Amino acid sequence: MIADLVQNTLDGLSAGATYALLALGFTLIFGVLRRANLSFGPAIMFGCYAATWTHVNFGAGLLLLALITVSGAVLAGAYVERLCFAPHRGGSAIAAMVASFALWMQFEELATLIMPRHLYAFPLLYEGDPLALGPFTLRIDALAMLGAALAACLALWWTLYRTRFGLAVRALIEQPAAAALAGINVPWVFVRVFALASAIGGVAGYLVVASHGQITPMLGMWATLKGLLAMMLGGLGSLPGAVIGGLALGLIEAHTQWYLGPQMRDLIAYLLLFVLLAARVPWMTTRSAS
Amino acid sequence: MSFLEVRDVVTAYGKIEALKGVSLEVAEGAITCLLGPNGAGKTTLMMTLAGILRPKQGSIVFAGEEIAGRAPHAIVARGVALVPENRLVFPAMTVLENMHAGAYQRGDKKTVPGDIERMFARFPRLKERAAQQAGTLSGGEQQMLAVARALMSRPKLLLMDEPSLGLAPLVVEEIFRIVTELHRDGTTIFLVEQNAHMALRVAQHFYLMEQGKVTFSGDPGSLAEDEVIRRAYLGSAQRPA
Amino acid sequence: MDDYAIGVLTNIALFSFIALSAYLLLIAGEMSFGQQAFFGVGAYAGGILTTLYAWPLPLAALAAMALGAVAQFLVALPTLRLRGLHFAMATLAAAEMARILFELMHWRREIDGELAGPDGTQGFRGIRWIFEHGIEPLHYLGIVGVLLALVLALFLMIERSKLGATLRGVGLDPELAASVGIDVQRIKLGVAAAAGALAALGGVLYAHHNTYIEPRNFDIMLGVHSLAYALIGGLGTAFGPLLGVLLDIGTLESTRVFHGYRMIVFGGLVALVLVYRPRGLLDERTVQWLRQRFS
């Protein structure tokens, strides 16, 4: 019993690490632009498919594939930012979000056109045996995911608190009206925040695909749903909340799946979100879309 | 040629025109103040000058250059900084970080620390609280921080929107003392105020604004002070009982 | 008219119902990511009633609409005070829960010696009421078309009435509406119930047209499409969502030029149109202009 609990907790944390990264990406965009980017997952998928295509046609090492994934995600994210968010900056949030929803359709169809098979193999992060620690098994790739997620969080923290760009991002999150008055070039910050969020998403996407060893066109939807769910659970607009929300989601999923199966796992996660939203728990409703 | 020349500026929110053709001038090196009742459009004018709002019509010429409709950061780069209504400090950032934010678009990074020292000399209370989160400061301290932040961009023209709003009388005196000091040190100031009494004491020239237009222009003393105050709070239209 | 054209037109009509339900909520100021759930509720409920309990389709459709209305009402009730993304996420959570429940639902009965009914992820096949009652595709198109026309007429009537103005007022500025004495909560609940009924109607008609439904039909992509239809078509008139559906299914599907690229073209079109027309092609201003020119 205890062994299961601990094992599930370990598994949950490593899945949660990925969710945390996805939630961070969503939260960065929401915190700064006050809008949700519904093509976040699909843009990540674009990067993953770019890497898959490279691997299938040329073969490539892990590092190169990771680089391609991140670059692809950033490129796709820039496309979304230009078409869906830049034009509506002072205008309708709904138009921006629905436009980003619409681009999701594009990314999904593009993936199936370029890589027509439903499933492709992707090089595994680690192909050896898991580590055995007494009664528990620790997958090396799970450790790698936790490590990479931690590194990404530290890099994000450093960017936000030790660079000029980070100061601008925090200014926009805390007091958007005054940020422009302080001389911050707001549109340019938006572009860079998008790139940063997409890069973080790309890392998350790469970790997921490389640890599962496969990729399907469902990745886009999956990443969006998990990221949104984790972001909302941790409190909309809060970066530490995104990390907590992601880890919490991972833990909740791991434990409910163990005892109740995969469908109940998802059902309970959504139920939890719905209940938290309905109860208007304060940490969830601090910021709203403009 | 005046330092700042505003001509026939019209700014609208959707279909509603908040500024219906505002014209005024700010002389270099002077303190000019703008008085008027709530809803007259004073903040809208400030936001338009700072570039947050785009005017539908009209021109805003600063130091010979047209700045109407330019982006806010471009206007800051040209030497116009606004201390906004309600101060709008960055609450989770420290006092020091707030001041660094004010210097964001300055190219000469090396001179920033020197400026910060000078700010601390001018605002000793901010120096005490340098590492404190700005959201935890008192109203008066936040006002000073907002002014210091704006000054960090080394503006040639400082716009101030109701700096005395919500502050205790002693603090208001301090704020106006700082305004006088800045003026003495050469900064041009364009000041929106509800506190007509204090504003007239420091200004060299003032305007009255009502319902989106300028209704009076003159020196303090050209209109009896109680008349000015009456118009500033109530407007000049005689309303039926 | 050949079978292909009939099929396309029927699909246009069917998806118009869910597009209209998204549109109704948008008018009242709420963005819903979850109308696909109520479309699914209608599909499953209607299918179960006609296939397993031999209800006549009209009755089953009414029951489906009632169920859809109740379902969306129940989702709206606890989430009334949520706005923007929070409300949208609540609807998404509810819709995903519904989809998972569809996956878990096994409601089987023996009909004519065979097991029929929803079988979880295997889907629900054999919804053959219209075929068993000799209704030709063309007739069905007529029925669906008439129902859609009735719905549109209802919408147009409401648009011109005080209720319509109230709805739009609530949508544009709920605080202002509340301050003039409008019971915003009641309006939003009413709109939710109506939207649920509308989506469910589309669903039951869809299920009987396709004869086979599965939980995957009611995933978030359907919700994405219905929002896109409503917004690109325009929020100025109930013909807006129809235009949106027409643009996607009608033009792109029937011309076959973009076959295989339909979502790429449509998705890009939506984003592009929204840049210049954030409230769609037939937005309030355009509708106003059209009314003035043709009156």
Image (cartoon, coloured by chain):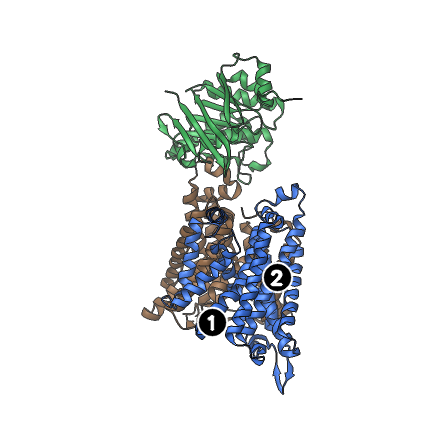
Q: Chain of mark 1?
A: C
The residue at the point 41 percent across, 37 percent down is B71
Task: Name chain B's colour.
Answer: green
Number of callouts in the render? 2
Position of B106 relative to A241 (above/below): above
Task: Name chain A's colour.
Answer: brown
**Toward the viewer: B147 or C77?**
C77
Position of B91 relative to A119 (above/below): above
Q: CA distance from mark 2 to mark 1?
A: 27 Å
Q: Element under label 2?
A: helix
The residue at the point 48 percent across, 38 percent down is A179
Query: Of the residues shown, which amino acid type is indicated by label 1?
Result: Ile
The residue at the point 57 percent across, 14 percent down is B225
* Res A240 label: none
Callouts 2 and 1 on one subunit: yes
Instruction: Report if residue A229 is visible in the image.
Output: no
- Look at mark 1 in the image and give the residue it sits on: C6
- Look at mark 2 in the image and give the residue it sits on: C196
The residue at the point 57 percent across, 12 percent down is B224
**Toward the viewer: A12 or A262?**
A262
Q: Earlier in the sequence, mark 2 or mark 1?
A: 1
Whether label 2 touches label 1, CB < 8 Å = no
Between circles 2 and 1, the one closer to the viewer is: 1
Q: Position of residue A86 (x, y in %)?
A: 43, 48
Q: Position of residue A219 (x, y in %)?
A: 47, 65
- The chain in blue: C
Instruction: Report if residue B110 is visible in the image.
Output: yes
